[in-house]
Amino acid sequence: MEAPVNSSPKIRSAMSLRDIGLHLRVPFSFFLLPVFWFALSQSAHPDVGRTWAVVLIIHLLLYPASHAYNSYYDKDEDSIGMLASPPPVDRTLWWVALGLDALALLLGIGVGWPFVGYLLVYGLISRAYSYDRIRLKKYPVLSWLIVGSCQGGLTYLATYQAINQVPVAELLQPSLLLAATLCSLNILAVYPITQVYQHAEDGRRGDLTMSRLLGIRGTFWCTAILFALTMIGFYIFFRGQAPFYGLQLCLLPATVYFVRWYSRVHRNPNAADYRSAMRMTLLAGIGLNLFFIILWGLN
């Protein structure tokens, strides 16, 4: 007599802790740390406790939650930032992202209500960026500007306000607004490069990212032009004094690599691959972090 066939659907086990950790992409927060160091370097008397709280909440909770939401809705099969082979995702990742957001807001109360407001705004915008019914990611210019504004200028001002506990109105000082603008310009310059190897994957989902809109060579030109504008801005910010030239020195490896990489891409567009993009991002991240840490130490 044959054994009865089990016709019930097979239940897939939940994501492993390892797979969840990979999709949080915590190491990627390193590339966004220069905004924090820049704000700290311009702070005369930052509160030590709030400074630690701010950097940990943003980089270990807020950003990883955003990455998790993005991974959940994108369901990438090809390489994404700091993740060469993304493991499959399920609803578990959505709940983890929600929990990280809730914990960030709860801990943010101890920092201050303006900081909580920043966490809430950033969180909602990053959800709208990925959520399939809104999907800001489908709109190349809008999503590009939003990412640059949130990860750049908004984060700089929120960090400065939180660690110095200054009134929100004081953030309208020209020097702070210029610094925030430079942070946004830098993100706007780098962000398309992080998408340059994802054209096929984005095309399958119907997402017209900024890099897809510009094309591979156009992406490099966009980055070069905005990087030049950012350096002009830093020349003004530092009044042409020694820190400006220190910045150029710290970014020299990234600049040289960018020029050599573009020469390869100009001959063969397939050279705009994941590995090269991550090397470029790593060199830029190391250079900027190093410069602003030194600047903070000197100040």
Image (cartoon, grey):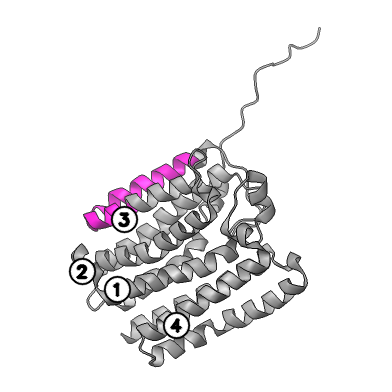
Dot 1: what SS?
helix
Horizontal and vertical percent position of residue 214: 62, 62
Label 3 crowd bin: few (<14), some (14–19), many (20+), radius 10 Å: some
Nearest to viewer (mark 3 / mark 2) = 2
- CB atoms at circles 1 and 3 under 8 Å apart? no
Q: What is the CA distance from the residue labelled 1 to the residue labelled 2?
A: 9 Å
Q: Which mark is residue 247?
A: none
Residue at which label 2 appears? 170
Residue at which label 4 appears? 232
**Quadrant in which residue 75 is drawn:** top right
Horizontal and vertical percent position of residue 84: 65, 57
Dot 2: what SS?
helix
Q: Which amino acid does the dot numbered 3 rest on?
A: Tyr
- CB atoms at circles 1 and 2 under 8 Å apart? yes
Name the chief secondary structure element in magenta. helix
Q: What is the CA distance from the residue labelled 1 to the residue labelled 3?
A: 17 Å
How many numbered circles does the render carry?
A: 4
Dot 3: what SS?
helix
Which stretch did the figure color magenta? 94-119
Up-down relation of residue 146 to residue 98 (above or below): below
**Residue at (22%, 57%) from the top-left corner?**
112
Residue at which label 1 appears? 176
Q: Which amino acid does the dot numbered 1 rest on?
A: Leu
The earlier-in-sequence mark between 4 and 1 is 1
**Residue at (49%, 48%) from the top-left corner?**
136
Q: In which quarter of the image is the N terminus?
A: top right
214 left or right, relative to 91: right
Q: What is the CA distance from the residue labelled 3 to the residue labelled 2?
A: 16 Å
Q: What is the CA distance from the residue labelled 3 to the residue labelled 4?
A: 29 Å
